[in-house]
Image (tube, helix red, strand yellow):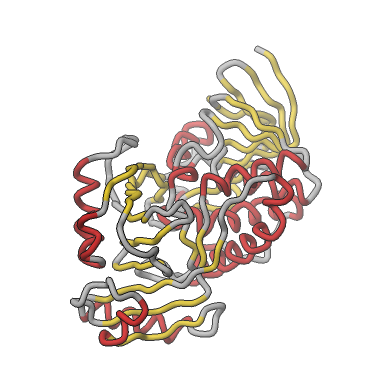
Amino acid sequence: MTSSSSGVVIIGGGLVGVATAYYLAKHGISSTVIERDAVGSHASGHAYGGLSALDGKDIHQPTLELSRLSLRLYRELASSLPDETGVNFEYRDRPAINLCFTDEEFDLAKRNVELNDGKGYTVSWVEANDIRAIEPRISRDVRGAVYIEGTSDLEPQRLTTAIAKGAENHGARFEKGTVTGLTRKGSRVTGVELIDRKIECDEVVVAMGPWSAAASDWLGFPVPIEPLKGQILRLRANGLPYKCSIGWSGNYAVTKPDGLVWAGTTEEDKGFDETPTREGRIHIMQNLVKMLPSMKDAELVRQTACLRPLSEDRMLILGAVPRWGGVYIATGGGRSGVILGAGMGQVIADLISTGATDMTINEFDPERFRY
């Protein structure tokens, strides 16, 4: 078995893994990213790419803080990374409108307006009669909506590629391989074992998305992550492009720079099955037509599916692994993986380079799963 060495080994070449490598490089720390398949080949390459800290049914403060960090980082990356790497990840500012059909949705939306207006967004309540002045094709069954200015979107596959190239430009290495375990001396990690070789290192970052649960056996420590399957449709529709992202109860639709309407998504417990399905397509179309009745005649161009990492308590697992000096884990973003990805990478890079982070991550501590 051959061996090599690296300061830090990052296991996983998705958005979180490459962002960690990029921000480590900014600290002057070299790293090697090990990816079993290809960079951005799973959820990071098939996600929707909407960026809003207000997405989701519940707004949890530490997650909100981290998502705001990510949004700032993406703006910074958009101003420099395309020129540096030659990869345009199609970052753009665009408003969002979140629809309400029921009293419960109405009440929750009102509370979110009160909590978040002026915190990086302009958030306003729109009465039912005024919604179609924003987008006339929205269903007439809508009771009201929240209109948000300050949101944005990007193309996640291109983003992951651009960040990886940026990391590589600053000294990071990328290798293909399958990790089978870790080695240590006393309580300190000393290396990563692959099928065909070993890499000696001082620190390890586990960032394998839904496959991070495999690290439980390496660490003797629970990493309770399961895959949450999500599907997306790309549709060709008549009429003008939608000028804003249109969402309702976890569903969304927006015209992307490719001219297609991207619509999603599903939340499925199907293990590690990444196959797009007819059932998923029907589910997405039913919810899409509820929001936008005219989309019933849209032409399907492409359907994709991916697996998003979801922890046992639906919170991130982010930070140092107990009883393992030099091992860190960053996973559990679920449907917010892109929104949180850059921030997660910077947090881990800060912990490795300085031993601390400015972010509030106590609630994400892997220690909470120690039985």
> Where is residue 69 shown, x and y percent of the image?
61, 65
> Where is residue 114 shown, x and y percent of the image?
42, 87
Q: In the figure, is residue 174 to the left or right of 44?
A: right
Q: Residue at x 26, y 84 (%)?
A: 128
Q: Is residue 68 visible?
A: yes
Q: 308 above or below 238?
A: above
Q: Residue at x 59, y 29 (%)?
A: 182
Q: Quadrant of residue 326?
A: top right
Q: In the figure, is residue 240 to the left or right of 69?
A: left
User: How many numbered marks, from 0 up?
Assistant: 0
Q: Residue at x 19, y 49 (%)?
A: 282
Q: Is residue 186 visible?
A: no
* Depth order, front residue of 58/136: 136
Image quadrant containing the N terminus? top right
> Where is residue 32 shown, x and y percent of the image?
68, 34
* Depth order, front residue of 330/18: 18
Residue at the limit of the structure toward the right, as seen here: 28
